[in-house]
Amino acid sequence: MIDAPDFSFAALSPLLLVLGAACIGVLVEAFAPRDVRHPVQVGLALTGTVGAFVATLLLAGTREVTAGGALAVDGPTLFLQATIAGLGALSILLFAERSLDPARSAFVVSAAVPAGSPRDRELVTTQRVQTEVYPLALFAIGGMLLFVAANDLLVMFVALEVLSLPLYLISGMARRRRLLSQEAAVKYFLLGAFASAFFLYGLALVYGATGSVRLRDIREAVTAESGGVLMVLGLGLLVVGLLFKASVAPFHSWTPDVYQGAPTPVTAFMAACTKVAAFGAILRLLYVAFGAAEWTWRPLIYAAAIISMIVGAVLGLTQTDLKRMLAYSSVAHAGFLLTGVIGFGAGGDGSGLAATMFYLVTYGLTTLGAFAVLTLVRDGDGEAGHLSQWAGLGARSPLTAAVMSLFLLALAGIPLTAGFTGKFAVFRAAIEQGAWPLAVVALLASAVAAFFYLRVIVLMYFSDPVADGPTVGVPGLPTTIVLAVTATATLALGILPGAVLDLAGRAAIFVG
Amino acid sequence: MNLSYYLVLAAILFTIGAVGVLVRRNAIVVFMCIELMLNAVNLTLITFARSTGTVDGQIIALFVMVVAAAEVVVGLAIIMSIYRTRRSASVDDANLLKY
Amino acid sequence: MPAEGLLAASWLLIALPLAGAAVLLLGGRRTDRWGHLLGTATVVAAFLLAVACTVQLAGLDGRAADVELFTFIATGELDVTAGLLYDPLSAVFVLLITGVGSLIHVFSIGYMAHDPARRRFFAYLNLFVAAMLLLVLGNSFVALYVGWEGVGLASYLLIAFWYTRPAAATAAKKAFIMNRIGDVGLALAIFVMFAQLGTTSYAGVFGSVGTLAGGTITAIGLLLLLGACGKSGQFPLQAWLPDAMEGPTPVSALIHAATMVTAGVYLIARSAPIYDLTPTARAVILAVGAVTLLIGAIAGCAFDDIKKVLAYSTVSQIGYMFLAVGLGPAGYVAGLAHLLAHGFFKAGLFLGAGSVMHAMDDSVDMRRFGGLAKKLPITFVTFGLGYLALIGFPFLSGYFTKDAIIEAALDRGDVWGWVLGGVAVLGAGLTAFYMTRLMLMTFFGRPRWDDGVHPHEAPTVMTAPMIVLAVGSVAAGALLVSVFPLADWLAPVFGEPAEAAHVVAPALVGLVVTVVMVLGVLTAWLFVGRREVPVTAPVRVSPVTRAARNALYADTVNESLFMRPGQWLTRALVWFDNRGVDGAVNGLAAGLGGSSSRLGRAQTGFVRTYALGMLGGVVMVAGALLAVTAG
Amino acid sequence: MLSTYVPIVGLFALAAAFALFSVAVAPFVGPRRYNRAKLDAYECGIEPVDQPLTGGRFPVKYYLTAMLFIVFDIEIVFLYPWAVANDALGVWGLVAMVVFIGTVFLAFAYEWRRGGLEWD
């Protein structure tokens, strides 16, 4: 007789709420009449994500391993789950914006209709909107929540796929510039599948070395120094799979193309939430399972951080498309985040874990806000992403330009914004662990990166507006909420980060 | 029989898959190569299940099959949609986003 | 000691103008009708509060009050708290900023009355006042830095206030770049302090700076000096300040004459405990001060733009202040006294210039002025008093404060003392020359203005601040020297004033300076006053004049100094100069961007290339890990 | 056994080298296929023609059939091991399986409502 595994429904409630809402969403798609689907789906998605957010807050302090040891619900899990659920809810609001695009939604009505065909043009004018994106996004959020809780490589792999597959699909569903969107989906899908094959091979090798995929068993094997070459190779391949998701160079090549091609709300969602989930998994894998082998992977992460920061900062310089620029910024920020990962001692000492988690919150909020502003500035063909179109925006729409400037300053890490406190925390953590050369590179990279952020600000305020420039749409309630929340949080975390830093500090203990 | 033969075979299959991804142009074929990589992993997993005397490897293989199947559906949908628009399934033709 | 009573509320000093700026910026057009009044009210309120705080401070033992504001970051062993320090030094600055600031706000109500963007102007001015107060009130270098960047931002926004004028936009960019160079120095200095001492608070740094190696202290001192030079328009970063006159005139008066540009002097005075340990850095300050003093004075002789002349005069006068604080304990008080006096008379002069421009349809060309004394009597009298104070007319404020600096220089007693003193005296002569030239060309002689111009006196709201400042210009020097001796007031910061052994009797110094001043005035009269001033500037002039007209080739010097050392910086400057977007991107691309686009070539857009890159990464990872394990 | 694993790295390296070679050589030896379809969905190009077979719509049948296959395929993959171990798993196993089948059924319901079962 095999005993039933222990299964703490309470501890898993955030996960169950989101995935439950996603399943109901599928039913709504199937049975609800078309004209009520949009409000119902949005309501459902918000209930699921906000509910999950509240649930994580109520669970604060929980430390347990459940579902037969496959899931760990501890401080980092809950902190990151709250982050993902919160950012996810904001992303859903961006998805739900209906007043900006004349076609009432950023998503194509029917993804199956070929781009540019007569039927496609016909559908532009209909009042129908796509609602399948909401269950898909919920499945992706559910996968992310699972990803950061995974205490088992198999669960981690399944979560990776659950979060990736819906993302591949919704990347290709843009209402406008559909060719770019579809191309982004194909690239994301092929490369993502390629990367998960490596992750899986790594899983198999680690399994071969230890006979188990539970992180706890792996840790014991690592501590006993059994496993040898197989284990090391497996570790390398697992890390590669995760670094891909986190868009760390040299596994970042998909990021600019996909960020640029995907519908902007989806890009915002990917940039904010996927990053959080991927780093949650990286931290857990490296510290819970391979903590004892830290001298094996530290040089690797060290190098990846440096490459990522340099590639992101340098390549961002010559970008002329804002979404693409923010994509390279995402690569650079992945490097900064790895700096925080380095700043965590395997023995649990050092503030690296707390710093990285705090950075994820600040980066997620800021980048989400920046992409939200991008959805406002439009020309006849959708969003006006080219840098030249933003010239003189400060004169035409001061509030939009001011909010964008705030986010850009935060991304650049200027004091009194969230970006500064985040950077400060991770750099300090790295220096405390003796990784000061890394911190120096990080400082230089942020200086270079600051240049391209400030370039946009200068362009907005001190260039003459282009003749037939873009219009700045009046955002509906959802986008307004997103902008208000992200801008307030960016400022608040810059001026009074104490509470959240403290929270991250107290949450920063893995259960093993 | 020495189990390492299976491992080496799996490694070779995995490598063939990886190289296939790099050199083939047709998106469907590229995708099949990725599936080949996943199946090579399955072979590895089964072999390790045998060598370590645990059953986990077999279970994982089942999960991998399921995930691979789901990936097929998603992947084909995406590839078909771009094929319908462009009349080409060559990954090299999907080249508008760059630099 | 912890602050009590009103001093505990000194954070309101910063909060009031900041709130004003926030209301005006966020309130939008709704606040157009009363926005300027609110903006002025917040600064006046801050001034009244500052007076009350200072009175209370005067009664405290030790005359210093710490105001703990909030904990910025408190995790682990690191505690970063934000707080204010209200001590005699900051009190002096707070009074200057809020006092002169109030007057200039009042003046601006009239000056900007017809500008559609007046509300935005007051918002920026309030923002500036808040940032400047934070700069002088912060209790750590980090707070100072935040204020420093804040005033930089406000100054940038205000220079480019009329951003539709290309010259204004270019000037703003130039100011931005040159200030960045200085800011990098300040930031590095703070980093060094934090890395070496683990703290950036004044108390912490000054308490333990002595434990550092001499080289490190000198490095910190020089980096701080670089920051000070950038903000205060000192050699070799002086070129942005005259260009900054593209901003509205009240801005020139408040920011680019009375307050912000003196932040460098504040920084060096505040860092006195650091400079006490590094004679090398001090010597560099002296050199910078002396060189700038002359450059500013010489360039001031050649320009026909009334605001540019005043701007170079500012550069030159701040050179005096640098010279003074570079002298060490002997000069701090003299420098700060000159700073205060200068704040009055230069703000008054700029407001006067504003009034003239107001009368002359915004013309700044002195060759087209002339004979305005009768048309603008109040402006003439107030401007004249400011002029006399600046050139050091006996018993007006410039006379006391400038002489004090020259005396302090001579009191060094060595050769360098004589050199510096000589430079300062020469500077006084030049000052008299260019200011007299300015007076003569503007207010005397035959009217040379165009037919359509009808000069008229400014409204009371503009003349009243000018009168107050004129009174201040006349009285400040005497007050600071004898009635409320600044030296005694600042004693808790710089130590009790020592009775210096004078090398040259003060009376003799005063006499010599006065004689040189009179010579300068006479020369100006000979060259300018006796002859008819041509309406267009003569082209065939001596090389000296040409050099002066080009501001001693400051821009050229800057180019060779800052553009050669790194392609990076070159490209950045080129980029900022290219106004077009494509030009911007291309210009940048040529430098660091070159490598960027080369690297970007790897982003071919082909899935297969990306996969290849990833596989390469995998091979590297696997190889590296195996190497680590095997090794 | 483990030592035989080192060649994997060699194989990876070989793969990378081969791929690099192929990609580098391709432009020189490959036939140039100028594919107009590359850009033709933009306004200046030729409209994509709807396939007459499916009447202008996507061949939905294919996907829906594929999804149907997945629904049942996945179910079977997990049902077999469960069935084999049913005795040992007891009630918990039964409940888990019911929940699982219920979830899979959601996809089935979606497919049914979207007309995937109508074979015309």
Image (spheres, coloured by chain):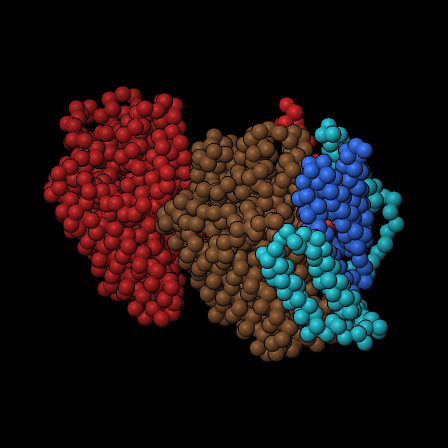
Residue displayed at 38% across by 26% down:
C216
Residue D120 location in percent, x, y? 81, 76
As drawn, D7 above or below C461: above
Image coordinates of residue A10 in percent, x first then y, are 47, 56
In percent of width and height, residue C346 lies at 28, 48
Q: Is residue D85 visible?
A: yes
In the image, A113 versus A133, the foreground residue is: A133
Taking A116 as reference, is C340 left or right?
Answer: left
Q: Quadrant of residue C418?
A: top left
* Rendered view: C135 above or below D73: above
Q: Nearer the viewer, residue A278 or A455?
A: A278
- In this view, the residue in front, C225 or A441, is A441
Q: Residue at x 34, y 59 (%)?
A: C21
Viewer-closest of A307 and C267? A307
> Residue at 64% of width from left, 67% of height from top?
D106
Query: In the image, is C22 to the left or to the right of A198?
Result: left
Q: Residue at x 58, y 38 (%)?
A: A217
Above or below, C94 relative to A123 = above
Labels in figure, total: 0
For the colour blue, the matching chain is B
The percent coordinates of residue D59 (x first, y second) are: 78, 69
Question: Chain A: what color?
Answer: brown
Q: Which chain is cyan?
A: D
Q: Report the side of A198 relative to D52 (left or right).
A: left
Chain in red, by letter, is C
**Taking B91 as reference, is A172 left or right?**
left
Do we see residue A465 in this rendering? no
- Indicate the quadrant where residue C325 lies: top left
